[in-house]
Amino acid sequence: MLSVYTDFIRIRFLTMLAYRVNYYSGILIYCMNIGVYYFTYKAIYGDAGSIGGFTAAQMTTYVAVSWMARAFYFNNLDREISTDIRDGSIAIQMIRPYNYVLVKFMQGLGEGMFRFLLFMIPGMAIAMLLFPVKLPTDPVAWVGFLVMLFFSFMINTQINIITGLTAFFIENNEGMMRMKRVVVDLFSGLILPISLFPGWLATIAQWMPFQAITYLPGSVFTGRVKGVGIWNVLGIQIIWLVVLLVPMIIIWRLARRRLFVQGG
Amino acid sequence: MMYYLGLISEYLKNYMKSRLTYRADFWVEVISDLLFQATNLIFILVIFMHTDSLGGWSENEVVFVYGFFMVPYGLFSCFVNLWNFSERYIVKGELDRVMTRPAYNLFQIFLENVDPPALVGSVIGLIIMGISGAQMDLAMEWWFVPALIVLSLSAVAIYTGIYTILTSLSFFSDAPTGIIPLMYNIQGYGRYPVTIYNRAIQVVLTWILPFAFVGVYPASLFLHREDMRHMALLTPVMGIVFLTLGLLAWNWGIRRYRGAGS
């Protein structure tokens, strides 16, 4: 039974591999994004020593790591799921002897593995050539970061699946998906580290799951958070991973009783 | 010409009809568009909580540039939406249907994807320009309105050119999504004072992916910034050049199109 699911990982990985040329241009574009933020922050820092607890050097690393982490954890599962729901192909998949949500998860994992190996790692190498990125030398920090990165991926994927499944209830969830994208980019700390936010906005951000995707692991990797703080970050990630399972399972349960195919 | 204007009104009528089926979604879309713009504004506002000037530009100036940037961006998003082109028209084969009709194929594709909620962004952009302009005591001059129209249309032409060129690439590669989604992250950066970037990025944003011409350059004309005046005046030229390149790339690409089967 398990092998059925691992096959979904493998197939998605191979599918992505077939279209890999697409991602070479992606690497350049991500590097350009990093560059633009790098120079913007350079202009802001001027002579200032540290802003929001980040030194200029840490900020550079933070920006590079955040974008490259996004190159790994990003996927379009929300769109895939809502397309399946709208064109009705989900009906066929629901009668097959596997769990639809779990299959999507596995496909996401296959895509994640592809993105990790062929997008994030080469992208990081190029970003390091172009910008003064300083990665930690301590192997423990690396192991910790890879574990956190995996949790970032899991939490982001859960959010994507939940967003995709809303198509069961909102017939056209295009706006919902766009809104999710914006909220994730802002509140995950990709655009701005949360410690730069004004107080009230930072408080809101701390009570949302999105900071666990980019901001928290990024803070650890740049060396802003050390020692016991690292375990706190991991704890927060695990809590959100578990908490987000609840809406996902509830929505899926409700959805199965409420399938309404629009054409197809 | 009349024929094409007639097509526009027919398509818009059709759009309204299909939209009435998903009424709530119209507003969700407006709100999500505005939220996207809001995050960019938040970025600017938060940055200026930590600094007084960005490469010699004040907060009000940067916000003004952003307001200008929203105007052509809203128009472009409304009338030129190529986001799903490759998936919808090539992979699913809808281009075959479009090509059997007499009207120009790219024009039909634009019309099939009109997105009027995006226009709300243009209106908000005008309001932002008004507010930040007032805070800087920017005197209203007689040429502001005609210049705004010409520069906005030029900026829309630049956007259309860039995205048409990029979309034309999907005639040559089998990639299912194309690189357009990745591009959407870059396009906003022309709205910051490009002088803060290093030479290479400035060159890219000015001549290769000229997103500086849809934000900071044209807006500097209204702000009376002498340093960018000649660039601002160059905007219409860039618009014509890039629109032409876009159409050439498109026509060249579509001649290679053979249909995907299925």
Image (tube, rainbow, N blue to C red):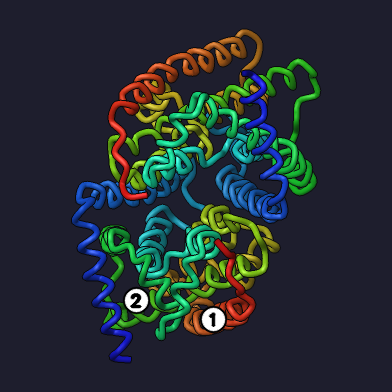
From the viewer's perspective, is A186 left or right of A190? left
Residues A195 and A237: in front is A237
**Would you call the spot at circle 2 few (<14 residues within 10 Å), some (14-19), or many (20 or more)?**
some
Real-space Cα separation, disc 2 to disc 1, in angstroms: 25 Å
Q: Residue at x 31, y 82 (%)?
A: B146
The kind of secondary structure element at disc 1 is helix
Q: Pointer 2: what residue?
A: B148
Q: Is residue A203 visible?
A: yes
The numbered mark at residue B222 is none
Q: Pointer 1: what residue?
A: B247
The outermost residue toward the bottom is B1
Residue A58, position in %: x, y? 66, 32
Q: Quadrant of the C terminus of chain B?
A: bottom right
Q: Earlier in the sequence, mark 2 or mark 1?
A: 2
Q: Residue at x 40, y 68 (%)?
A: B76
Q: Quadrant of the N terminus of chain B?
A: bottom left
